[in-house]
Every structure is written in structure tokens, then in C-alpha cells.
Amino acid sequence: MKVPLIEVTDLGIAYRLSRNQASTFKEFIIRAVKRQVSFEQLWAVRDVSFKVAKGEVFGVIGPNGAGKSSLMKAVARVLPPSEGRVVVRGTVAPMIELGAGFNTELTAQENIVLYGTLLGRKPEFMRERVRGILEWADLLEFGDVPIRSFSTGMLARLGFSVATDVKPDVLVVDEVLSVGDESFQARSRARITELMNAGVSILLVSHALGMVRDTANRVMWMDHGRPKMIGKPGDVVDAYREWSH
């Protein structure tokens, strides 16, 4: 059996919430120093296990608050597990939040270099790739424009173009592909197919159920932080649609 590029075992992610309400930050600090602050754990993800093979697209669906984004952040090595284990073999290109890795005061060209550097690529290499990235994103005429004036669709195109310009081992995509227009979504699906054929493992989170059904090899439905169903895209999407209606 081939070694999977993504291996999640009994994953749990918990956030600490303060039980004590303080009217000011100063009051909170004083209570914390006096050990008058108690915390409770909120489990965003619990008992999640799955593997993703090389070249496989693994879709994740579920309602808001189901723990999907927390799961993606753990796979992207942004959020450490509270319990269990996450193993990712190789380089990761994460798109887990629209605009993450960008500086809104910088231009599109400057952000390409910045985001690429954060992904582990050399600045010199990214400067050489600027024009090609802007062309793919249909943003060539906006290269010198600060991205604070970009629409969400423009940000999605720019981020996806940078993340997929160089073949990673694992691509983590959270909701971004459902933001752009139909043309962008079609080109994104075509590029995802290219990455799949090149052996890239893709973790795809989206509320666009039709796209998940058409793109993924397998799908996991999450609810209240736990996996409710894992299986063929059609079976899982149909069951989720019936449940949600």
C-alpha cells in the first residue's frame, strides 16, 4: 500500500474559553494574576481520522461551525492538535482563508512575492513569476494596484494563482473556489485536475456541493466537529442535502 500524503488519526482541536467575564482587559489581567480566571474547553474537532493518497482530492462538507476550517488549519500546520496526530508528507500550499498571507497596503505584485516567500519560495524566483501569475489570474492590468481595493473574487484569483503556480505536494483549499465567477471556477477546476494528474493531494472545503461532487474522489461530511459520513462524493453529498433540508 502506498504511503498517504495526508494522515489524520483521532484528531481533536480544543479552544480555551474564559468562564469569567471582565469589563476591561486590565481587570482580566488582574484576575489572571490572582488566579481568579477559569477556563473551559470548546472542542471544535473531535475523533477525526482519514487518509488522503497521492493525487487524490478529499472533499469536506458540513454546516457552518462544523469544524471544517479548524481541521484545514491543522492539516496546513497552522494550528497544533490538542489530541491525536496529523502527518503531512511534503510541501503544503494552504489557501485556508481569503486574503491570508497578503498585506492589503501592498500592490498585487508585491503580495505575490510576499505570499510566495511565506510558502517557502525564494523572492528572486517569485519576482520572475509575477507576470505569469497575474496573467493566469486575469489581473495583469492591476499589478501596481494595492489589493485593499480588490474584490473578493480578485483576491481569490490572485491567491489561487500564487498557491498553485508551483506544484506543492499538498494543496489545502478552504471555500476560496466558491468565491470567483464561473470562468474562474472552471479554470480552477482545470488546474486542480492538472495537479491531481501530477500527484498532488488536495484537501477541498466548500459549501459549493456541486463542485465538490464533480471534483472530489471522496468526501467527508462533518457535523459538530465529528465526521458523520465518509464515502463516494455522490452518496455523501446526497445524504447531506437530504439532512440539511
Image (cartoon, rainbow, N blue to C red):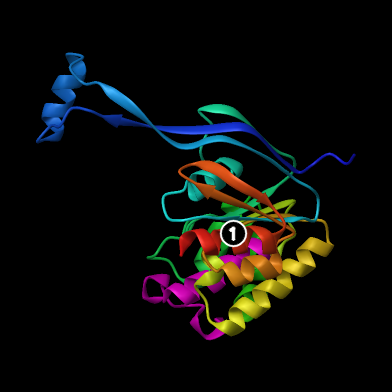
Q: Please rate how many residues cluster around mark 1, counting C-alpha atoms within 10 Å: few if below 14, some from 14 to 19, many from 20.
A: few
Q: In this view of the protein, can residue 98 be seen by the observer?
A: no
Q: Is residue 148 magenta?
A: yes
Q: Nearer the viewer, residue 125 or 10?
A: 10
Q: Position of residue 151 (x, y in %)?
A: 41, 76
Q: Position of residue 65 (x, y in %)?
A: 41, 50
Q: Is residue 147 magenta?
A: yes
Residue furthest to the right in view is: 1
Q: In this view of the protein, can residue 240 be seen by the observer?
A: yes
Q: Nearer the viewer, residue 161 or 106?
A: 161
Q: Is residue 128 above or below residue 54?
A: below
- The range drawn in magenta is 137-164
Q: Nearer the viewer, residue 127 or 75?
A: 75
Residue furthest to the top in view is: 34
Three-letter amino acid code of the residue under disc 1: Ala
Q: Which residue is mark 1?
A: 239
Q: Position of residue 165 (x, y in %)?
A: 69, 66
Residue visible at 17% across and 17% down in the picture: 36
Quarter of the image holding residue 206?
bottom right
Q: How many marks?
A: 1
Q: Position of residue 227 (x, y in %)?
A: 57, 43
Residue visible at 90% across and 39% down in the picture: 1
Q: Is residue 34 above or below residue 120?
A: above
Q: Is residue 144 above or below residue 240?
A: below
